[in-house]
């Protein structure tokens, strides 16, 4: 059954994945779901379609390879697991077995960014750089748990692969009311409009960017927040329009290495399109292994928490 929710409540993105895949399994008889021993949220699909559910155990490379084989046979494979391992341990298989032949394999996973308190081996912080570099790969990073279901549904019609990045996926804030935004892969969302500055963000830090915009509004500052949930292909027209409409002032906030993720992709668009900016602030994980801690604590420690976001926005707005 479709998941119901109330705007602003906390919801498990994993439960949305599970219910959406079970629903889609009825519509698509060639939908297979695979996991490297991370299948707790997939029980609805497993119970309904046991012949189309494959748990390979802790073997991400094998999981991606089997998914590619199923896709060659005309099926729609979804791989669900932990992104630190799907993006790095199985990188060669994703590149060669999936992207090279441009197969419709969907890779959905959790632990994108400094979430889960698992330490540096269990944080996916390089993943957007790695996946974004792969030919044919579409790359997304989702903050609103209800968006996950919509992105999965849209991906069913895609002829090539897609990477869907989530946080821990157990307790996520619903950011958008039903029908509030037109959610389409490849197009950003103006989560809040404004004229003084644009904060570009994705995934777990969308909520933080909205909180920063609220705080800055108390100072009389009008801040646009763009949820750039598709990093590749990126919404170039929205970047250009935001530069024109918010004084050429950008802050890019992301739970990923500060270089190689969204900020780098936006900087590339700005350079390639000859866009003139007044200010550009880049907030993300510095070149460190971040250690253990709560995700908000780690963001504060490494300079891209809420107060750092507000400070960066004030600096950017102050430049003329």
Image: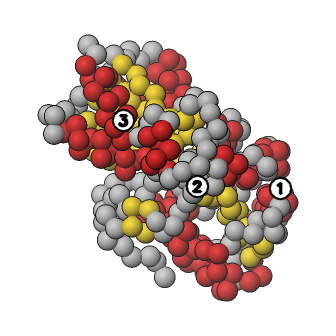
Q: Residue at x 56, y 47 (%)?
A: 113
Q: Residue at x 29, y 37 (%)?
A: 224
Tell me where residue 63 sits by quadrant.
bottom right
Q: Nearer the viewer, mark 3 or mark 2?
A: 2
Q: Is 307 situated above or below 14?
A: above
The answer to which of 86 and 146 lies nearer the viewer is: 86
Whether residue 225 appears in this view of the structure is no
- Asked which secondary structure carries label 2, the reply is loop
Give how far apart the Cα atoms at labels 3 and 2 are.
Answer: 22 Å
The answer to which of 262 and 273 lies nearer the viewer is: 262
Say which residue label 3 marks. Answer: 309
At label 2, counting other C-alpha atoms closer than 10 Å, the crowd grade (few under 14, some 14-19, many 20 or more) is some
At label 1, counting other C-alpha atoms closer than 10 Å, the crowd grade (few under 14, some 14-19, many 20 or more) is many
Give how far apart the Cα atoms at labels 1 and 3 are.
Answer: 38 Å
Q: Residue at x 60, y 41 (%)?
A: 290
- First in sequence: mark 3 vs mark 2: 2
Residue 59 location in percent, x, y?
83, 61
Q: How many marks?
A: 3
Q: Residue at x 44, y 76 (%)?
A: 3
Say which residue label 1 marks. Answer: 61
Q: Is 242 situated above or below 127?
A: above
Say which residue label 2 marks. Answer: 117
Residue 14 location in percent, x, y?
55, 68
Q: Is 56 situated above or below 126?
A: below
Question: Where is the C terminus found, in terms of image quarters?
Answer: top left
- Looking at the image, residue 66 sits to the left or right of residue 312; the answer is right
The answer to which of 251 and 195 lies nearer the viewer is: 251
């Amino acid at each position: 059954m479709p998941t119901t929710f109330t705007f602003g409540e906390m919801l498990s993105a994993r439960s949305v994945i599970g219910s959406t895949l079970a629903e889609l399994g009825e519509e698509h008889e060639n939908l297979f779901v695979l996991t490297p021993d991370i299948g707790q949220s997939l029980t609805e699909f497993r119970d309904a379609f046991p012949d189309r559910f494959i748990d390979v155990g802790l073997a991400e490379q094998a999981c991606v390879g089997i998914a590619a084989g199923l896709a060659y046979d005309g099926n729609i494979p979804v791989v669900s697991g932990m992104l630190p391992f799907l993006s790095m341990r199985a990188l060669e298989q994703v590149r060669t077995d999936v992207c090279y032949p441009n197969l419709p394999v969907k890779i959905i996973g959790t632990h994108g960014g400094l979430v889960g308190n698992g330490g540096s081996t269990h944080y996916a912080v390089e993943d957007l750089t790695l996946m974004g570099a792969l030919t044919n790969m579409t790359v997304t990073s989702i903050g609103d748990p209800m968006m996950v279901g919509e992105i999965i549904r849209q991906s069913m019609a895609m002829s090539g692969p897609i990477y869907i990045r989530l946080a821990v996926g157990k307790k996520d804030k619903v950011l958008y009311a039903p029908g509030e935004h037109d959610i389409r892969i490849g197009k950003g969302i103006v989560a809040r409009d404004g004229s003084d500055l644009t904060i570009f963000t994705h995934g777990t830090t969308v909520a933080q960017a909205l909180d920063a915009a609220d705080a800055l509004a108390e100072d009389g500052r009008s801040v646009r927040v763009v949820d750039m949930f598709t990093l590749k292909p990126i919404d170039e027209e929205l970047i250009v329009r935001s530069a024109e409409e918010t004084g050429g002032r950008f802050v890019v906030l992301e739970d990923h290495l500060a270089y190689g993720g969204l900020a780098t992709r936006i900087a590339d668009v700005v350079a390639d399109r000859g866009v003139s900016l007044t200010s550009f602030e880049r907030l993300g994980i510095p070149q460190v292994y971040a250690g253990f801690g709560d995700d908000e604590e780690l963001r504060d420690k490494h300079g891209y928490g809420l107060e750092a976001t507000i400070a960066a926005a004030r600096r950017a707005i102050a430049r003329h």
